[in-house]
Every structure is written in structure tokens, then in C-alpha cells.
């Protein structure tokens, strides 16, 4: 029987999609990525490429590019309403929000696109309209009117994945964590520095300003919102709700309110996790946030996307039967994803006090944690083997680099 390249369609050109495309292409698959945006979506906030994702980036040859695109953030400072610093956490120290490989999401997307664009077909300004599958193939009908046949279709289009809905219906659950967030890019002001500035206000509100390499500032507005109120929200409610939550917040809130009013770069969503009982169904599968979003509060979303895509690509290449590859992928990746999703008790509510007294307590506690004495002790316990840090909870990454590229039957 003549060997032929297996054709794979990936939905989503953010992080998981291009990483998966890189590895599949490397191992001899014919890969296309469909992206509903007309071009790369280069916005977003700072993300960390940490833990085992760093090792995958090294194997992909993009570690130096990620380092070169570093945001320049030197650490995280907790500030009060007068912009007085109550706690400082340099990125080299313990408990810092800032990591070594800190990069704006859009910069990583661009790095991954440049890495894959010559070997992967990108279909921009299009999306999957409907899906069918049988023993021979998966058939895809696109919104722009054309159709195609593939051996596999992979959803990598994020937490609100439309492709996942076509594949699995309502079976995967979005588990809301009681918190909403808004991201936007704003003009840099004199008060902005190379530090990320975290401001806690009463009424369960947190504002965060972070530097980037583009001469602007990345802002996020975060607040607790009961589930029943969240589910009533329409898109038209987003800006009015943000302006309401910024009112009386103090610190840089008036500046942020002005930026929200004029922004066409506003991202608003509820914070939650995706809980899916299975990640594949026949010739359909999912990866990254579409499969197992851990929520931004985990700080591991990019890590799960990169590692999951690497393992999925490697296992599909390692197994001649795609069903065995998909089963092995989920068996290896699910325990790690579930451990990342297992947030500490009280998260995120403990960081969002309701009263002014609660705010004072949070700032005081952060000041104690940031003190020299506590940091010295924390540093003793936080030191770890760099090789251990690049594992999946102590389990080493599989190494697929020796798999021979070429046709796979």
C-alpha cells in the first residue's frame, strides 16, 4: 500500500495551533491552519513561557527569539491609591509575578507564525462552518463556501472555541470562577515604569499595569462578579460595567476609564476553566485552551498550550493509527493539565477584598512577604533544579526529536 502524507486541519492561529503545526509539519504531515481573523491577532497581555514549555521552545529553536522579545518588565510592585509602593518583587526573587521569559502574547504569535509560514498553509479570514466524519475522512465546510477533506481536525481556537462546539456540543463545561477581566493597550504615561504595578481597591477590584516593548502599556481591569450577574451580560454591557467598576476605584482609575471609553482594542471575558471529559472523538480533537484552559490566574495557560501541542504532534507521529496517538496524547497530558487547573483554596477571592480594611490587610501582608527577611527564607525553599522545573510535575517530557520526518502511513 502506498504511503501518503496525513492531512491535518487546525482551527486557530494563536499559540497552540502554530506549535502543533510546527511539530506535525516537522514529522511529515500536511498541515493547514484556519483563522477567523483577517490577519494575525497581535494584541494581548504578557504571558510566561515557563516550566516544560521552555524546553519545547528550546527544541523548536525559538528560545533566543522569545528572550529578545522580552517585555523588559523587571518585577512586580504592589501600590496603594497614592501610587506608593507597599511591596516589591523583583523577577529574580521568590513570589514574583514576573518570570524570566515574559513576552506579550502577540509577539509570541508572530514568532510562531514566522517559524511555520513556509511549511504550513494559513487560511485567514475564514472558519469552520460544519464538520462531518466517517471511517475514511473528516469533511470540513468553511464559512467562505469551500470544502475540504482531512485525516484529522484539531480545535486550537481558545477558551470560547466554536470548533469545539461543533465537535463535542455542550459536553465540555466552562467553569466560571466568579471573576471578570478586561485587557486593553493604552498610551504610556509618566507614572508607568519597567515594573508591573498591581493595585488592589475595595469592592473586590484589582487594576494591573504592565510595560511592553512597543512603547505602550498593557492594562487589565479585574473584579469579582456573581455568576448569575455574569450570565446576564451582553457585549453591549461590557464598557458600561467597566466604567461603573472603575468609578471611585482610586489610583489610575480615571485614566483607565478614559482609555476604556475610546478603546477599540478591548477584550472582556469571564475567568474560568474548561473541563472536558474527553479531548477527542474519532477524527476530531482539541488542544490548548479549547481542551483544558486553566484560567489566567494559574499563570500556566501558555505552558499548557505549548506542551499539549508538542505532545499531541509527537504522539500522532509516533503512532501509525491516529486513534492510538490521540489516546496516548490524552493519557500523557491530562494529569498535568488537571494539576495546573487545581488552584489553591480561596483563589481568586482572597486577592479581591471587599472592604478598605481588607485592602489594608492585603497590602500589609504583601509588604511582609516582600521583606528581606521573608524573601531570604523563601529563596532557600524556592531553589530547585532547573531540569526539574522543565518537567510535567516531575515527569520528564517525551522526546520526539529522533522521530524520522517523512510520509506516515
Image: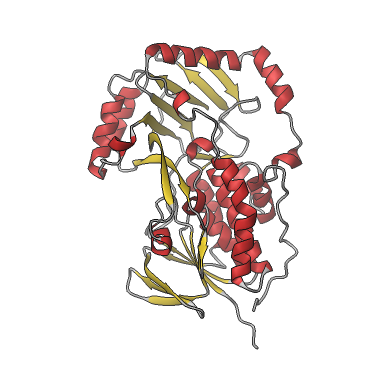
The scheme the figure's colours follow is secondary structure
Q: Residue furthest bottom?
A: 1
Residue ID at (51%, 12%) = 364
Decide if residue 262 is in sight here. Answer: no
Residue at image position (51%, 47%) is: 107
Residue visible at 67% across and 54% down in the picture: 61
| 1 w.r.t. 386: above or below | below
Check the picture and name the quadrant holding the N terminus.
bottom right
Position of residue 324 measured from the top left corner of the image (x, y, whole percent)? 63, 68
Q: Is residue 249 above or below residue 45?
A: above
User: From the image, which quarter does the C terminus lie in?
Assistant: bottom right
Work out whether residue 45 or residue 242 is closer to the camera in this orientation and state it: 242
Left or right: 288 in relation to 179: right
The x and y percentages for residue 341 are 54, 41
Q: Position of residue 177 (x, y in %)?
A: 42, 36
**Image location of residue 197, percent across then percent down:** 48, 24
Q: Quadrant of residue 146?
A: bottom left
Using the rendered view, name the quadrant where residue 321 is placed. bottom right
Above or below — where is 361 with respect to 66? above
Q: Residue at x 54, y 14 (%)?
A: 365
Q: Is residue 184 rendered to the left or right of residue 276?
A: left
Q: Nearer the viewer, residue 179 or 52?
A: 179
Q: How many marks?
A: 0
Does residue 277 appear in this view?
yes
Relative horizontal placement of residue 206, taking residue 101 as reference (left or right): left
| Drawn side of residue 108 relative to residue 50, left or right | left
Amino acid at each position: 500500500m502506498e504511503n501518503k502524507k496525513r492531512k491535518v486541519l487546525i482551527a486557530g492561529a494563536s499559540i497552540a495551533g502554530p506549535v502543533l503545526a510546527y511539530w506535525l509539519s516537522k514529522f511529515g504531515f500536511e498541515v493547514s491552519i484556519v483563522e477567523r481573523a483577517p490577519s494575525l491577532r497581535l494584541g494581548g497581555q504578557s504571558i510566561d513561557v515557563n516550566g516544560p514549555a521552555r524546553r519545547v521552545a528550546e527544541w523548536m529553536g525559538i528560545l533566543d527569539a522569545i528572550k529578545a522579545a522580552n517585555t523588559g518588565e523587571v518585577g512586580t510592585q504592589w501600590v496603594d491609591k497614592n501610587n506608593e509602593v507597599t511591596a516589591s518583587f523583583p523577577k529574580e526573587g521568590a513570589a514574583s509575578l514576573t518570570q524570566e521569559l515574559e513576552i506579550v502574547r502577540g509577539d509570541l504569535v508572530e514568532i510562531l507564525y514566522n517559524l511555520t509560514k513556509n511549511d504550513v498553509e494559513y487560511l485567514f479570514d475564514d472558519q469552520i462552518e460544519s464538520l462531518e466524519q466517517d471511517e475514511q475522512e473528516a469533511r470540513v465546510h468553511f464559512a467562505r463556501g469551500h470544502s475540504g477533506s482531512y485525516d484529522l481536525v484539531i480545535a486550537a481556537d481558545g477558551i470560547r472555541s466554536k470548533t469545539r462546539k461543533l465537535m463535542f456540543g455542550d459536553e465540555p463545561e466552562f467553569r466560571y470562577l466568579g471573576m471578570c477581566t478586561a485587557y486593553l493597550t493604552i498610551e504610556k504615561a509618566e507614572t508607568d515604569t519597567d515594573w508591573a504595578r498591581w493595585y488592589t481597591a475595595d469592592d473586590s477590584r484589582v487594576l494591573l499595569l504592565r510595560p511592553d516593548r512597543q512603547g505602550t502599556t498593557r492594562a487589565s481591569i479585574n473584579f469579582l462578579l456573581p455568576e448569575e450577574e455574569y450570565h446576564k451580560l451582553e457585549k453591549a454591557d461590557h464598557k458600561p460595567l467597566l466604567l461603573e467598576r472603575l468609578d471611585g476605584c482610586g489610583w489610575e482609575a480615571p485614566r483607565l476609564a478614559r482609555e476604556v471609553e475610546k478603546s477599540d482594542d478591548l477584550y472582556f471575558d469571564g475567568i474560568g476553566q474548561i473541563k472536558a471529559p474527553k479531548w477527542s472523538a474519532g477524527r476530531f480533537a482539541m488542544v490548548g485552551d479549547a481542551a483544558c484552559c486553566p484560567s489566567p490566574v494559574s499563570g500556566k495557560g501558555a505552558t499548557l498550550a505549548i506542551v499539549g501541542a508538542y505532545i499531541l504532534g509527537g504522539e500522532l507521529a509516533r503512532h501509525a493509527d491516529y486513534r492510538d496517538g490521540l489516546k496516548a496524547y490524552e493519557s500523557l497530558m491530562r494529569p498535568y493539565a488537571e494539576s495546573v487547573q487545581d488552584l489553591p483554596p480561596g483563589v481568586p477571592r482572597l486577592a479581591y477584598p471587599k472592604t478598605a480594611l481588607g485592602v489594608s490587610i492585603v497590602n500589609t501582608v504583601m509588604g511582609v512577604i516582600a521583606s528581606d527577611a521573608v524573601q531570604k527564607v523563601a529563596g532557600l525553599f524556592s531553589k530547585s533544579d532547573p531540569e526539574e522545573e522543565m518537567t510535567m510535575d516531575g515527569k520528564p517530557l517525551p522526546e520526539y526529536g529522533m522521530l524520522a520526518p517523512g510520509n506516515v502511513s
